[in-house]
């Protein structure tokens, strides 16, 4: 993979590491992927599940958030069952390094946690804003972690960026819309 990337960049005839690109950088994006696993030499998937979130980039500074809600929280049936449930989240910050005008590498550090608890299906709540019904989730334990990793993204057109992020507690994709002024 690195050899192909080196050949591609060698043929691109682009200026490498042009940090002036970051002065025009502003984007908002959407994240989706797996959050809540642990990587300590082996992958522990006990809390891993699908999550979604948002990202923001301004002047090269990148911030993102991804969250996994309790699996049984959004049920629409009332019952006396108490489900064992969990949540996970990851918040990261980094700096986008423009390798070429269309390729970015982003080292990340941040915070990650997993909670365990019970979803009480005998309760019901209504969110009037988006007209949804949900059950109470009672958190019993929180495991907090230092998170670290990297992201790699490409800009196929000036207004769109597509990337992937891999950290010690989450793996997810990102799609962002750019609001940049044209270079004159």
Image: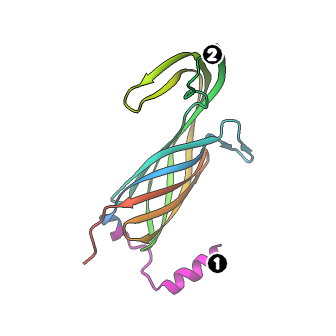
Q: Which residue was labeled with disc 2?
A: 79
**Structural crowding at the residue carrying mark 2, measured as other residues with C-alpha within 10 Å and reported as few (<14), some (14–19) or many (≥20):** few
The label shown at residue 3 is 1
- Depth check: 113 or 177 in front? 177
Tell me if residue 147 comes above or below residue 127 in the rendering.
Answer: below
The reply to whether residue 113 is visible in this rendering is no
Percent of width and height locating residue 96:
43, 61
Residue at left offset 27%, top offset 68%: 181
Magenta span of residues: 1-21
User: On the rendered structure, is 95 left or right of 81?
Assistant: left
The reply to whether residue 159 is visible in this rendering is yes
Residue at left offset 53%, top offset 84%: 10
Magenta-drawn stretch contains 160: no
Q: Mark 2 or mark 1, which is nearer to you? A: 2
Total numbered labels: 2
Q: Quadrant of the N terminus?
A: bottom right
Q: Quadrant of residue 59?
A: bottom left
Percent of width and height locating residue 68:
56, 37
The label shown at residue 128 is none
Residue at left offset 58%, top offset 79%: 6
Q: Secondary structure at mark 1?
A: helix
Tell me if residue 169 comes above or below residue 158 in the rendering.
Answer: above
**Structural crowding at the residue carrying mark 1, measured as other residues with C-alpha within 10 Å and reported as few (<14), some (14–19) or many (≥20):** few
- Depth check: 170 or 108 in front? 170
Give the mark, 2 or 1, whose residue is nearer the N terminus. Answer: 1
Magenta-drawn stretch contains 12: yes
Q: Secondary structure at mark 2?
A: loop
Q: Quadrant of the C terminus?
A: bottom left
User: On the rendered structure, is 70 left or right of 84?
Assistant: left
Model colouring: rainbow
Tell me if residue 140 comes above or below residue 115 in the rendering.
Answer: above
């Amino acid at each position: 993979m690195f050899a192909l990337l080196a050949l591609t960049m060698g043929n691109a005839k682009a200026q490498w590491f042009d940090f002036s690109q970051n002065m025009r950088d502003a984007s908002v994006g959407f994240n989706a992927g797996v959050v809540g696993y642990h990587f300590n030499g082996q992958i522990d998937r006990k809390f891993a599940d699908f999550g979604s979130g948002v990202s923001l980039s301004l002047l090269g500074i990148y911030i993102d958030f991804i969250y996994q809600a309790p699996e049984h929280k959004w049920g629409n049936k009332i019952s006396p069952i108490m489900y064992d449930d969990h949540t996970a989240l990851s918040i990261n910050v980094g700096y986008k390094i423009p390798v070429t005008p269309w390729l970015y590498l982003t080292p990340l550090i941040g915070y990650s946690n997993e909670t365990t608890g019970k979803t009480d299906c005998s309760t019901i709540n209504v969110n009037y804003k988006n007209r949804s019904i949900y059950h109470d989730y009672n958190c019993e334990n929180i495991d907090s972690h230092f998170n670290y990793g990297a992201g790699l993204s490409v800009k196929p057109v000036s207004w769109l960026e597509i990337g992937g992020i891999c950290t010690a507690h989450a793996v997810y994709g990102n799609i962002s819309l750019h609001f940049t002024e044209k270079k004159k």
